[in-house]
Every structure is written in C-alpha cells, then in structure tokens.
Image (cartoon, coloured by chain):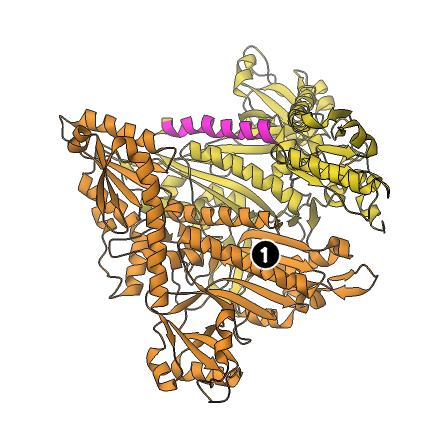
Chain colours: A yellow, B orange
C-alpha cells in the first residue's frame, strides 16, 4: 500500500546543489507544482496558507495605519501604460498583451497589469481635486504578470506573482516621506514575526531604483548560496506620476500643486526566501506561525494497543486544539515511519508521537522539526509545552537566519579582495556615487549594488571608492543577485 | 468651501428609472467607479470592504467544512481549454486572449481564465492516483475575465469579476452529491446573515445549466425591477471533466474509476444585488455587517460650543469602539447638513448626532439610515443601543427583502396569465420537461427558466405544462432575467 512513498524522496543536498535541492523540496513536499504555463506556479494548500497568512497580518497592520483596500482592473489600455516614459521603458519588455476577445480583435491592445500605477493614477486624477481629498492611501492585493524570459524558479523568478501594491498620494513631500518608515516598519515586522527572516534595509542606487521612482528603499536578503535577493520595497515617486497623470490639487490657500506619491509592495517571492533560508536536507522547515499544520500527531500501535492509543491520541488532539493547528494522522494504510518522513518533508514544526509507552506513562513525545530534538511531556502540560515549543522554534529559526546573514556581511576596501568575496553575501564597500564605477564593477565582477543602509552611511567619510579611488560618498552593499 | 457637493446628488428615483438610479447611487456615493476599460470596474474602499467581508466569512465556513485554499495560474493554454467540448463552447466566445509578450508573439495563445476547471484538472490528474488522494476539495479566490459584448452594468454584467471557485473530486457520486447541501447551505447563510438577502434555491434546467455540468443548482434573486438574477451556484459535473482530463483513481479494491466532481461559486455580482435590493432614493443602504463604517458621529456646534461638543463626541467614539466600526466626522470645512447627505448616500447604517443639547442632556441622537427613525439614547447606554440597532437594521432589511421576494412569486397555470405576469418576478408554472416548450416560451414571452426548487416539485403532479398542456413533470420558476 505504500507505493507512493518515492514522491516524498529527496536526493539533492542544500550545501551541494542548492538549486536542485530548492526545487525538490518545493515540489516533492506538495508545497507547489508546475503548471502547463512555464513560469506560472500552482500554489497547493500549504503554500497558499503561507501567503494567506502573510496577507492577513500585513493587511491588519496596513489598516491600523489608515490604509484602505481597493481593487482596480486586471487589464490596462496600452495608451495608459505609455504615459510615464521611464515606467513604460521598465515594464514594456515584459508585458503580456491581450489582443483578442472571443473571435474579435480589440481596437487597442490591453496589458495584463505588470503593476497598477497607470490605471490607478487615472482614477486618482479624477478623485483628487483639493487638499481635502488627501492623503489618499490605497492598497490592493492582486496578481501581476511580468513575462520573464529567463529560466523560471518557483517564487523567486516567474511570470506571475501575488503581491500587495500600495499607492499613496500626499499634499506634501514631508508627509510622503513619513509614510516610508511606517511601511518598511510593517514589512520588517512581518518578516521578523512571521517569516522569521532578517534583511538589510537601505536605499537603492539610481540605476537600480524602480522605473519611474525618485528613490527606492528595499529590504534585501542573503540566500543560502550567497547570492542576494530583493525583498519588500517602498518607492518615493515624487511628482513623476502625478505630472504624467495630472494628479493636481488646490491647497488650503487656493494654489494648485501636483501630489507627492509613493508605492510599495511585498510579494510571494518572500515565500521562496523563507523556504530556502530555513529548510534542510530532510525537506521544508516552515516557521510555526505560517504552518497550516503546526503539530501532527502520529499514533504508534499494534492490534492490541490500537484502540487505546487512538483514543489517547484523540484526547491529545482535543487538548491542543485551542493552542495550535493540530492534525491527527490516523490513516491506517501508512506506517508511522512513512508518516514521519512525509510530515518532515512538509515541514510541520512539531511531531507528537503517541504509542503504548506514552499512554502508560501519561506522556506525549514531542519532536522538533528544526532541530530533531525529542522531549517527553506529561499529558497535562501538553498544550503549554506545545505553545512554548512553537515559540522557541520560531525564535531559533530567526536567530539562525540572523547569524547566517551576519556571517555573510563583509567590509571590503580593496578591489582585489572585493573580486574574491563577491558572490558570498553582502560586500559593504565605499563608493564615490558615480554610475560609471557602478557599471564597471558590475561588468568586471558581476557584483550589483544591492542597497545603502542609512545607519552605515557615516562610515563613508574619509574612505575611497572601491573602484576609482576618489572620495567615497556612500557605503553600498554589493552582491551577486537573483 | 462646499464646492463638490454636487457629486453626491441623486436625480433618478428607484421606482421610476431603476437602471439610472442604480448607476447613480453606485458612482455618486464613491462606492465604485468606471475605469478606462469598458466593463471593468474600480472597487473603491467601501465596495471592496463588502467583498473582503463576504470573502472572509465564506472562507471561514469553507475551512470549517474541510475545504482548503489554493491558487492556480491566471493564464490557460488554448489546448487545455479545448479539452472539454461543452465547456469550451460555453466559454470561448467570451475569452480574452493573450497573444504577445513584450515584443514576442507566443507560440500558443493563452486565455485569461474565464473559470479554472481546465488548468486545475490537469493538476488533479497528476495528483489523484488512489482513493487515498480523495476527496480533494480545493477553493480559490481570484479574478476572472469574460468578454461580455452587451452593455455593462456594474457588478451585474461586466468583463471582470471577483469570485470563489470551488473544485472538488470525490470517489463516489454519493459523496459528490452530499457536498452540494453543505456548499449551498454556506452560501445561503452568507446571504442571510451578511448581505441580508433571501433567494430561491433550485435546480437549473438542462438548457440553462453550466457548460460541462450534469446538474446546476442556483440561488436566484428577484431585483427591484422584477427581473431575476442568478446568484451563487453549485454544479455537479459528474465524470465529464474527469474523463476529459483523465482524473482516474484506484479504489480500495484496485479497480480504476474516474472521479466525480463539483464546482461552485459566489461572485461580486451579489454586491450589486445587495445594493439594488436595500438602497433607496437617498442613496446606498449597506447592511450593517458589510459596512466599512457602521456608525458616523456628526458633531453640531458653534464657536462657543465647539470644544465641549468635540470632546463629548470623542468620548462617544471611544465608548462605541469595541462595539462597532465608528467614525467621527470632525471635518471643519463641511456643515452638518452636508455631512448628513454624504453619509446618507454612502449608506452608513447609523448616524449619531451630537450637539449642545445632547451634551447637556447626557444623550446622543441615533438616526437609522434604513428608516430615518431618530432616537435619543443616554450616553451610558450608547454602545448597547448601537449594537442592538445594528442588529435591528440587519433584520429589518432582510424582512423587507423577503416580503418583496414573496410578493413577487406568482403561481400561474394559464399561459395568457403567464404572458401578463412574466417580467414581474418568479412565475411558478408547471412544465412538461421538454426543451422545445422551454425554448418556445422564451421566444414568445422572454421568460427563461430560472430554477426548480426541490420543495415544490410535488406540486407538479396532476397539473399540465403551461405551454403544451401535456402532463407536467416539474414546477419551474420562469422569469425575465439579467
């Protein structure tokens, strides 16, 4: 009866073949699947649960910050997309175009939204007339399509992803700037408290900022292979879009001005970073708050102990229900060992083993997915111990990820050293600010500018650009990136 | 300063020009807006809040029923869409086709999902191998595009809508049939408890069922203009799709069979039905549980009473916060009268008026949006009174809608009478079951078969088909429909 055990097998090792390992743990654990559209992923229940939870906790914080949800059309007329020059240059190579409906050819091509600035700002221009209509802070949870031509990687690079897109309009630059801290604070909290992920926050250089923005701030992660990936971000668009879309308002004194705008996003890409960071050679490790099943009970019995063990297991299930998302795996057709493997690859944080011995001792054995640590706890303390173990797993995943991040930050002033270290995390080096040096470094080493954390910028003073030797103006995180 | 008051004006009356009134209350209340894609709606915060809430309460009930959420790609390759013959005939006239990405022409056209059967069932075929993989009950919250060529009406007829699509696979027909009651029960509960909407549940005739289904059950609503509109539905697909997509499994005895499947949906169309049903000539009336703002406090003061009234209003706000979603409208630039109008057209269930008189009496005046009823309540009882008034409004909206429905059901055995009554609600008439009679009735009267409620089918016995006079086999709701 255990004919389908092989689908849960892993052959690749994280340390030896990261990218093969990454794919195996995602697919074989039934977390996601490929579809017949290359680069478009099927989210199976465990992965969609992660996204739903990220969405719901982020959404709650947005609402507390006064941001309201809305929804805008999936399709954008080509003429709208063309309105902001830099924006269209950034996105048009990747746009999926709808040209026909039924048997009719459309009179104008429609883009599937790669992002919604253009269609939203047409409405903003209608709605905003005076200072009384500001600020306008809207958020949308939707799906976007960007036709990526490179080899797709689940969550990290594909043609469709789910995200939030926040879009704001303010009367003054000061108010617009003040929103940045709120939003990045929310994203950092979601990463810290739910995904158990640290990251480095900083400003992007002008060549790496969002198409159409004045300034982009990002949170960047280091992946297990030493490459770096951009996480959630916040863009100050200044008056770029409001000028292109005529988003004008009359201030309290009757003067007309263009609104100051921001946009920001967190996407399903973070699920890939989370999986890659925490998982191991046995499969997924899902941070407890994002695990659809947090505790799985596996009963161990023979014919004579079956009924009493199952009854005891049900009692254990009941006693934990108020504390955690618990599942009793009472399938008769699989052995306990087979179940252990399956739940391990699926990354369930805690396995509760219940056999005759536990029944007699009035205890339950809890096994941590992240460390493999086993502990027998008395039945009466089960709920309490599970709650604190889930907490402990979360904290320990975060601590390990933070250690990994910290051990992959290098302070480098010498270009030879830079060339050796690039690709193994964040290389923090001084830079003169010239796009030429930035381009040359990228060309010669594959090292791109990731971002510039505000809190280390004072270290630039007195140092020299890693490339040209002129006085440094910034300290930049250089990295090979996804 | 009140230069934008006219945007909140209504000129049409519900009883005189229903369709103009419907559009005015939706647009002028800032509930939704048009976009530059005809038939694709912009959901502003108040309308999206309604959808979010419908989604979250329905989702909770789905989860309690063991249904798991997932996500499937937005785009479907043409060859997949062609796999089930009836299905493709039903949908292909309305499909939006993606033919290009960036500057490249795609080798195969991709459909924006009009519904996801075809892309999901390709995965189902991969995942389902044995009885142990069943039942598989997945649900998706997403957006779909159907290129409707008729004149669009917000929520009721358009080219994009938001919905849930539930898709299940079972080992036996019995299990598949048993799901229907659960799902329709959930939809009825959501309609009853949140949208305050009644409806008539029944089976569709074969000519009106879903493309690819064996049987469709729907909940149908009567609109204020006497026309009928289809609400949430549940389709038994039998083995139609499982045969087309090779969704086969080995049962416990090692025999191979095709899975039995169902699909079901509730969509943003219901928001339109809700708005049309409850609203009046002053604007929207939003059922309290779906109102983003449930109570709006409007302070009334002059220079000398300003501070004390505002302070008292803040205290009122605080005292209601745990009970309802309350907003204090303390904008200085608008008069109380202007505010009354604005919140009335927006359909906020309760207005709390606070002036010097209330301050001195230690009371607050509450005004019901649905009836206009005013009552002064002592400050200490504010939260309690608001809670029970919200309840009362909900129940009274439902009761009125149910009265309206009941007064629009006609039992008709005579075809002349039928011709007179058709268009004014549900005409319940006996029918022989012949598609010819059904087609003739539609041709001659514009009356379509809406559905056949199970509980009245016994009334068919001994009666004659309204069209041909042969013995009746069903009692059908005939109606002019949206």
Residue at the (47%, 32%) spot, across then down: A61
Q: Is residue B375 above or below residue A464?
A: below
Q: Is residue B437 above or below residue A319?
A: below
Q: Position of residue B480 (x, y in %)?
A: 39, 74
Kindly identify which chain the residue marked by label 1 belongs to.
Answer: B
Residue at the (51%, 85%) spot, across then down: B436
Per the image, is B158 magenta? no
Q: Nearer the viewer, residue B311 or A360?
A: A360
Q: Is residue A343 left or right of residue B65?
A: right
Residue span colored magenta: A175-194
Q: Position of residue A46 (x, y in %)?
A: 66, 43
Residue A448 visible: no
Residue at the (52%, 46%) spot, across then down: A142
Q: Nearer the viewer, residue B145 or B29?
A: B29
Q: Quadrant of residue A383?
A: top right
Quadrant where the N terminus of chain B is found in the figure: top left
Q: Position of residue A39 (x, y in %)?
A: 66, 49
Q: Secondary structure at mark 1?
A: strand
């Amino acid at each position: 009866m255990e004919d389908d055990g092989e689908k849960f097998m892993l052959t690749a090792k994280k340390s030896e073949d990261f990218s093969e390992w990454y794919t195996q743990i995602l697919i074989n654990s039934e977390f996601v699947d490929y579809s017949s559209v290359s680069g478009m992923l099927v989210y199976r229940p465990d992965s969609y649960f992660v996204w739903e939870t990220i969405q719901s906790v982020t959404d709650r914080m947005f609402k507390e910050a006064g941001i309201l949800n809305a929804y805008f059309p999936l399709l954008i007329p080509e003429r709208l997309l063309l309105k902001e020059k830099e924006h269209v240059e950034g996105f048009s190579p990747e746009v999926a175009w709808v040209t026909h409906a039924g048997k009719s050819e459309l009179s104008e091509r429609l883009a599937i939204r790669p992002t919604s600035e253009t269609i939203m700002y047409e409405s903003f221009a209608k709605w905003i007339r005076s200072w009384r209509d500001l600020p306008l802070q809207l958020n949308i949870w939707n799906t976007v399509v960007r036709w990526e031509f490179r080899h797709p990687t689940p969550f990290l690079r594909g043609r469709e992803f789910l995200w939030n897109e926040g879009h704001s309009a303010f009367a003054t630059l000061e108010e617009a700037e003040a929103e940045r801290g709120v939003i990045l604070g929310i994203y950092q909290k979601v990463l810290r408290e739910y995904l158990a992920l640290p990251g480095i926050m900083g400003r992007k250089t002008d060549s790496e900022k969002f198409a159409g923005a004045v300034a982009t701030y990002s949170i960047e992660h280091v992946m297990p292979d030493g490459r770096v990936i951009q996480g959630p971000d916040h863009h100050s668009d200044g008056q770029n879009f409001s000028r292109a879309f005529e988003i004008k308002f009359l201030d309290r004194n009757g003067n007309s001005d263009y609104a100051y705008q921001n946009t920001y996003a967190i996407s399903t890409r973070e699920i890939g970073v989370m999986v890659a960071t925490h998982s191991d050679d046995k499969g997924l490790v899902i941070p407890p708050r994002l695990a659809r099943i947090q505790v799985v009970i596996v009963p161990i019995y023979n014919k004579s102990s079956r009924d009493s063990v199952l009854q005891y297991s049900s009692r254990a299930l009941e006693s934990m229900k108020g504390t955690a998302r618990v599942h009793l795996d009472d399938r008769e057709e699989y052995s306990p060992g087979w179940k252990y493997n399956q739940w391990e690859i699926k990354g369930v944080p805690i396995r509760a083993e219940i056999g005759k011995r536990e029944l007699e001792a009035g205890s339950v054995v809890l096994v941590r997915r992240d460390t493999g640590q086993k502990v027998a706890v008395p039945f009466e303390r089960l709920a309490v111990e599970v709650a604190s173990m889930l907490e402990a797993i979360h904290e320990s995943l975060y601590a390990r990820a933070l250690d990994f991040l910290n051990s992959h930050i290098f302070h480098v002033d010498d270009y030879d050293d830079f060339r050796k270290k690039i690709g193994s995390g964040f290389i923090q080096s001084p830079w003169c600010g010239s796009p030429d040096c930035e381009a040359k470094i990228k060309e010669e080493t594959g090292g791109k500018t990731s971002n510039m954390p505000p809190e280390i910028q004072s270290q630039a003073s007195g140092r020299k650009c890693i490339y040209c030797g002129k006085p440094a103006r910034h300290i930049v995180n250089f990295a090979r990136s996804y």
